[in-house]
Image (cartoon, rainbow, N blue to C red):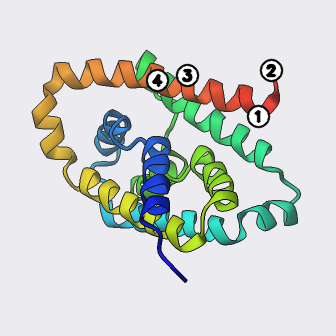
Amino acid sequence: MTFNLSQILSTTMVLFAIIDILGAIPVVIELRRKAGHIESEKASLVAAGLMIIFLFVGESLLKVIGLDVESFAIAGSFVIFFIAMEMVLGLTIFKEEAPETVSIVPLAFPLIAGAGTMTTLLSLKTEYHTQNILVGIILNMLFVYFVLKNTNRLEKLFGKSGLNILRKAFGVILLAIAIKLFRNNTGL
């Protein structure tokens, strides 16, 4: 078991780009408003756990339940699509009757550890050693935890107008990501 700094850096950067927690700040703030609070520790640990489990048994698990990676990605694209529509149009589609679960769904899954992240883990596994991918996951989850823990400060930094602009802009970006995930996995 040897750790390779180059592989760790590569996997960390790839996962950082896919998770895109900085781009998700407006979504996180919106979810916090709806739920009253976000459990940063719970969201980070659940997302990390999901990614680690999926790294080891993801492909096998999907095969056991009769799913392929493409179907999994398409399902994730729909969830992301509806969250993006809420942000862009100011609708309320996602109604959570138990606000304490917002930290798990949709935050930990599918926003942080979503279909894009899971499929990326499967492709990283073909190129890099597992221990280096694990370090990349842990480094990303530490950063995610830091961002989630500081959403109040980030909200004050951006202000109400800045957040509205960010929410609309990132809503469009999330919409594009959802459509790209859908197109890539359907061949349309």
**Amino acid at dot 3:** Ala
- The answer to whether marks 1 and 4 mark residues whose Cβ atoms lie closer than 8 Å is no
Mark 1 residue element? helix
Q: Pointer 3 and pointer 2: residues touching (CB < 8 Å)?
A: no
Amino acid type indicated by mark 1:
Asn
Give the residue pinned by disc 1.
185
Q: State the image coordinates of residue 76 (x, y, percent, origin top left).
A: 64, 41
* Dot 4: element: helix
Disc 3 element = helix
Q: In this view of the protein, can residue 37 be seen by the observer?
A: no
Is disc 1 surrounded by few (<14), some (14 to 19) or many (20+) residues within 10 Å? some
Amino acid type, mark 4: Ile
Q: CA distance from mark 1 to mark 4?
A: 18 Å
CA gap between label 2 and label 1 equals 8 Å
- Residue 173's label in the rendered image is 4
Mark 4 Cα-neighbour bin, 10 Å: few <14, some 14–19, many ≥20? some
> Residue at image x 67%, y 71%?
56
- Give the structural element (helix, strand or loop) at label 2: loop
**Mark nearer the N terminus (3 vs 1):** 3
Q: Are marks 3 and 4 in contact (CB under 8 Å)?
A: yes
Which residue does the image show at 28% across and 49% down from the upper left? 36
Tell me whether the residue at label 2 lies in contact with that at label 1, contact meaning CB atoms closer than 8 angstroms: no
* Residue at image mark 2: 188
Given residues 140 and 165, the one toward you in this image is 140
The CA distance from mark 4 to mark 2 is 19 Å
